[in-house]
Amino acid sequence: MNRTKKNRLNDSLFKYFGILNTLLGLIMLAVFIFIILQTGLSRLSWDFITSLPSRFPEKAGIYTALIGTFWMLALTIIFSVTLGVSAGIYLEEYARKGFFSRMLEINISNLVGVPSVIYGILGLALFNRYLGLGGSLLAGSFTLSLLIIPVIIVTTRESLKAVPRTIKEAAYALGATRWQAISRQLLPAASGSIVTGIILALARAIGEAAPLIVVGALVYVPFIPNSPLDDYTLLPIQIFNWTSRPQPEFQVNASAGIIVLLFLTFVLNGISIYLRNKWQKKVKW
Amino acid sequence: MKQMSLNIKNFAFPVLIVALLASCGEPRKAGEKEGSISIDGSSTVYPVTEAVAEEYTAAYPRVRVTVGESGTGGGFKKFSRGEIDINDASRAIKQSEIDQCTANNISFVELLIAYDGMAIVVNPANDWASDITVAELKKLWEPAAQGVVTRWNQVRSDWPDRPIQLYGAGTASGTFDYFTEAIMGEAKQCRGDYTASEDDNVLVQGVASDEGALGFFGLAYFENNKDKLKLLAVDDEDPSNGEGAILPTLETVKNKTYTPLSRPLFIYVNSKAAEKEVVQDFVTFYLDNTSMLASEVGYIPLADNETAEVKAKWSTFISTLQPVK
């Protein structure tokens, strides 16, 4: 009796502890979004989105930074998805399990935790200087791809693992080759969670400034890039520049820029939820 | 189950948007100036260069001017490899950087463009201090003061016996190098137990909310937060450049009586790049407009005779270059 009571008490204690912690996170987020909206929302306008950078806070806009961010996102998707997903498939489905593959696995997991600026330094030496790409979009997107490929590899492998083994075995039983089994059965079944992983990784990547400053993202770029070899600037970098300016009007611009960046992140997360739901409904055995 | 290929088509959408947006450039006009100029370097000089680039691009939209802010040192690294045309610098080039340039066969010209005053500030509730000498600043900030000089009356005996909190630029910034060089006589010599930030706005907030605070940062940050801060006059105890303690203002920085805490800002132009017509034209434009634009973004313009000197230096420099094709 006594023990039952104690257990019940513990149970409700943990419940309230959990509620408290959940609310703490949510309240912090709500306060942050409220302050940003309060300072920045009035500054947000079509002009703000389509204007070039300027020394006059009221004339300055994020046009080139926003387009730079789109470019960066598109290029990063191309490189990181191709490399990350195929490496994940190889490691999960083709590679022989042994000492070597276990070492590889541990190292890839470790790479997820490497500070992003380290990738910037690597990118500077490898892409900017050795490959001679300079401070181009291409060098930047290679660097960002490096940053998120480990995450994509890990997600791809986990998603493939989650597909029931019987599906693969059934495909083999019907005479499918390995690639047929992967491309027609495993990947479609796993694609919902793979895409979710990719999009979450990208949502992280578009907020990155540190590694891209190292690999040559500029601040004042009064034109939009025409090719992957052009100079560029990005939203996080423009925001960072504005927050460090002495004039308080630039802080307002920074808040408005943050709203746009938050909006982009929300859209990305929305797409990931949509795709996940869409695919999960389609996959039926 | 329905067949699905790896869904490339879902990624085609953002690529398409980018391609669409990228294709709407401005139409080309004949006979207009064209070319590209790459600038990097000090984040302190950045607002001036940004202002010049903005005006220049407005006049010549076909010239692509880009400005980065990897810091004075980071900029010189790129400059010495010939990766950029112009470097913004909040201090003069160091011997090691000159050697690097020489090793890579790069020559350049140094052009003074404006001054930046460094403000020594306290909290507005501070009613005891209104000026400070360079010797007192040294006593307060030198490495030996760490953990020892912690109260106001240790700096000057008639100040109250209450704790002093210090705020200053982080060790990676040019502001830190300049402050330590000017006060301690040697760059990077400084106590470590102070609140450091690379972001001057953080320092402004710190000093504004702490009654026992003393901090240093760029004058423009004081100008934009006058109601939250109190400026101290600085006395270098050298009557030859102005008697007594002097407050940093446009006049005192310009006529060099506010010493030693006013620093020169430079641009360095690569000689190879200066052979290009657009770069020549841009730098000339820079020197013509810098005095007006520098004060707009919070810096102190050169005196008229200095502007004339710098312009003369620039025209002599370009006349020694090979003729432009």
Image (cartoon, rainbow, N blue to C red):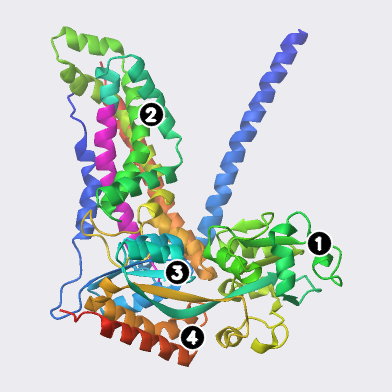
Q: In what element is the residue under mark 2?
A: helix
Q: Which residue is mark 3?
A: B93
Whether marks 4 and 1 lie on the same chain: yes
Q: Is residue B106 above or below residue B301?
A: above
Q: In what element is the residue under mark 1?
A: loop
State the residue at coordinates (45%, 37%): A114
Q: Which residues are magenta?
A: A59-87
Distance from Cα at disc 4 to Cα at disc 3: 20 Å
Distance from Cα at disc 3 to Cα at disc 2: 42 Å
* Amino acid type indicated by mark 4: Leu
Distance from Cα at disc 3 to Cα at disc 1: 37 Å
* Residue B49 magenta: no
Q: Position of residue A158 (x, y in %)?
A: 36, 23
Q: Chain of mark 4?
A: B
Q: Are marks 3 and 1 in contact (CB under 8 Å)?
A: no
State the residue at coordinates (74%, 13%): A5
Q: Are marks 4 and 2 in contact (CB under 8 Å)?
A: no
Q: In what element is the residue under mark 4?
A: loop
State the residue at coordinates (59%, 88%): B251
Q: Mark on residue A171?
A: none
Q: Mark on residue A108?
A: 2
Q: Is residue B168 above or below residue B306?
A: above
- Along the viewing direction, whichever of B239 and A241 lies nearer the viewer: B239
